[in-house]
Amino acid sequence: MTTADYWARQRVIITAGAGGIGRSIAEAMLGLGAKVWICDIAEAALEEARNALPGIKTMVCDVADPDACNAFVQAAADDMGGLDILVNNAGIPGPAAPVENISTEDWTRCFAVNVNGQFFMARAAIPHLKKNQGGSIVCMASVAGKYAFGLRSPYAASKAAVISLARALSVELGPDQIRVNAIAPGVVAGDRIRRVFTDRATTRGISYDEMAAIALRAVSMKTMVEPEEIAALVVYLTGPSGRPISGQVMQICGGLEYTE
């Protein structure tokens, strides 16, 4: 089977696919010929994606709602005739504050989206993947799940849980030839990191530029990661060349080895 034939047969769902990393992944897979469904909570962004990306299918879905996850996966699988790839991309940054200043609601919401959402989507998708005796799940984690991230404890803890979930799923699903990997991006260029840096700068009482310099000081290449670069890694892991790769945490961070 050629690479083109492979991608023409792939049926993909991507959470939070209307913008940022998810949008880049959707564009990459559509460009390869795959059938792609995306979900998001932003209706306007989904409409824009439909207009910009011919062939894409969309649905509003809050991944923290298990019934919404079940409905999204079922609708996509029914439309595409099955499912081959799940990209668990949805996540929120959570609060940027000392632990004693973090509300129960903010902590709970961060885990509801970042961890529960990935669990709900995987639970709904796995029966469809097992029917194929093969497939792939990518869980979007973060370097925050591997290193100490002060003032971001809900986010860091949730992403550590995502890494653990991906590893557990890789063991469970290996006999069914379903590969499961986590991707741990570093500092990713875009609107989201600008919001995070702004919040952290305010909490620390420093400027935005000072906060950005601190974040990149720990990156050996001194540069942010582009969403398109993360999309390329997802394509590799879910493509034919990535068939024997499972249970891994793939860092894409420009050489980040510690945090401050």
Image: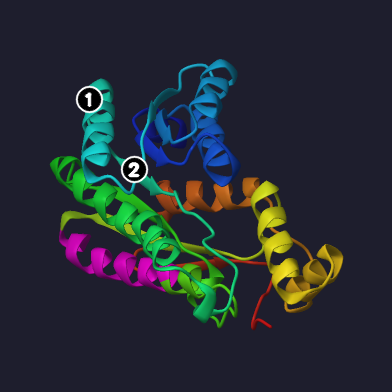
Q: Amino acid at mark 2?
A: Ile
Where residue 11 sits in the image (x, y, percent)?
33, 32
Question: In which quadrant is the N terminus drawn?
Answer: top left
Q: Are marks 2 and 1 in contact (CB under 8 Å)?
A: no
> Hey, which quadrant is residue 249 in on the image?
bottom left
Residue interval drawn in magenta: 158-175
Q: Which residue is identified by label 2?
A: 85
Query: Magenta segment, principal secondary structure?
Result: helix
In this view, the residue in front, 29 or 41, is: 41
Look at the numbered disc 2 and give the secondary structure of its residue. strand
Quarter of image, res 12: top left
State which quarter of the image contains the C terminus: bottom right
- Residue designated by label 1: 81
Q: Magenta stretch containing residue 214, yes or no?
A: no
**Is residue 169 found inside the magenta-colored segment of the image?**
yes
| Distance between mark 2 and mark 1 Cα atoms | 13 Å
Q: Residue at x 65, y 81 (%)?
A: 259
Q: Residue 222: in sight, yes or no?
A: no
What's the residue type where badge 1 is placed?
Answer: Gly
Where residue 116 is drawn, which disc sits there? none
